[in-house]
Amino acid sequence: MTSKDCQSRKHPVLRHAPLALIVLIAAIGAFTLRDYLSFDTLRENREALLAYRDTHFAAMVAGFIGIYVLIVAFSLPGAAVASVTGGFLFGLAWGTAANVVAASLGAIAIFQAARLGLGQTLAAKLDASDGTLKRIKDGLHENEVSVLFLLRLVPAVPFFVANLLPALVGVKFRNFVLTTVLGIIPGALVFTWIGVGVGEVFDRGGSPDLSLLWEPQVIGPLLGLSALAALPILLKALRRKKGI
């Protein structure tokens, strides 16, 4: 009996337990942690954080990544604050690397939890479907990498949606990991860049302005990357229409 067969024979409660736990913790965190995972908390603790970073750099990086993974894996509030904090603490290069690693690990964790339970059930139903659902399923799997990149690059798609939706429709794990790691780099660069200058913002008595994400010089390149990700889908559609 293969490991896949063993997983499919698990009691439904056990299969759905990881995702149920994530939903429960996410709901609790939305009400209890919002005031703590904030820019005000970063402002109030920045001196202590910088002092600890200067004396225990490796431990600070490991601790930061661990906390960020939990934020993403349990869809807790504060992901944007964490990304900005990465830039504030570690600079553009190290901060971007830490943000990408942490966000990717958290995304993989929630993807696996969703795929193990609800995703397994929905994927089986899609495999057994026909008609419109079958065409949608076939189209998705034919353009899987492009669609996954679009989910990562389009700013309007919430991060938790880009983590959960692929698991619920049965995309390949390796494609999810590849597009997650590469697809979040542009956004991570922007948030980290904001974080690099956040100390000066605090000194002026202000708060980081995340509306910068929607400035033409930022949103333009992101939309350009989104168009590149969508190009293979459009070309395949045109070829199919022309019978090539």
Image: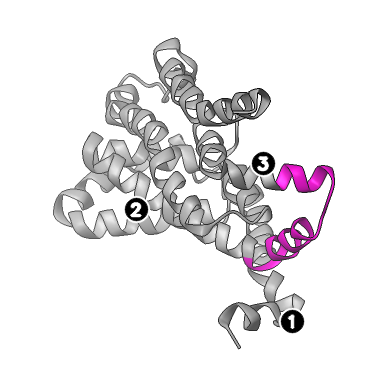
Q: Amino acid at mark 1?
A: His
Judge depth for marks 2 and 3 and give the one in front. 3
> Is residue 50 in view from this perspective?
yes
Residue appearing at x 24%, y 34% in the figure: 92
Q: Position of residue 18 (x, y in %)?
A: 63, 68
Local crowd size for mark 2, using a 10 Å CA cut-off: few (<14), some (14–19), many (≥20): some
For numbered disc 2, what is the local secondary structure?
Answer: helix
The secondary structure making up most of the magenta span is: helix
Q: Looking at the image, do the residues carrying marks 2 and 3 touch, with CB atoms under 8 Å apart? A: no
Residue 92 lies within the magenta run? no
Judging by the rendered image, the residue that carries numbered circle 1 is 11
**Could you tell which of marks 1 and 3 lies nearer the N-terminus?**
1
> Is residue 210 in view from this perspective?
no
Instruction: Please tell me how many numbered marks the rendered image carries.
Output: 3
Q: Amino acid at mark 3?
A: Gly
Q: Looking at the image, do the residues carrying marks 1 and 3 touch, with CB atoms under 8 Å apart? A: no
Judging by the rendered image, the residue that carries numbered circle 3 is 139
For numbered disc 3, what is the local secondary structure?
Answer: helix
* Residue segment shown in magenta: 116-137
Local crowd size for mark 3, using a 10 Å CA cut-off: few (<14), some (14–19), many (≥20): some
Q: Position of residue 176 (x, y in %)?
A: 50, 51
Judging by the rendered image, the residue that carries numbered circle 2 is 64
**Could you tell which of marks 2 and 3 lies nearer the N-terminus?**
2
Residue 197 lies, with reference to residue 14, above or below; the image says above
Q: Amino acid at mark 2?
A: Phe
Left/right of residue 203 with respect to residue 107 in the rendered view: left
In the picture, residue 160 is in which quadrant?
Answer: top right
Q: Position of residue 28 (x, y in %)?
A: 66, 56
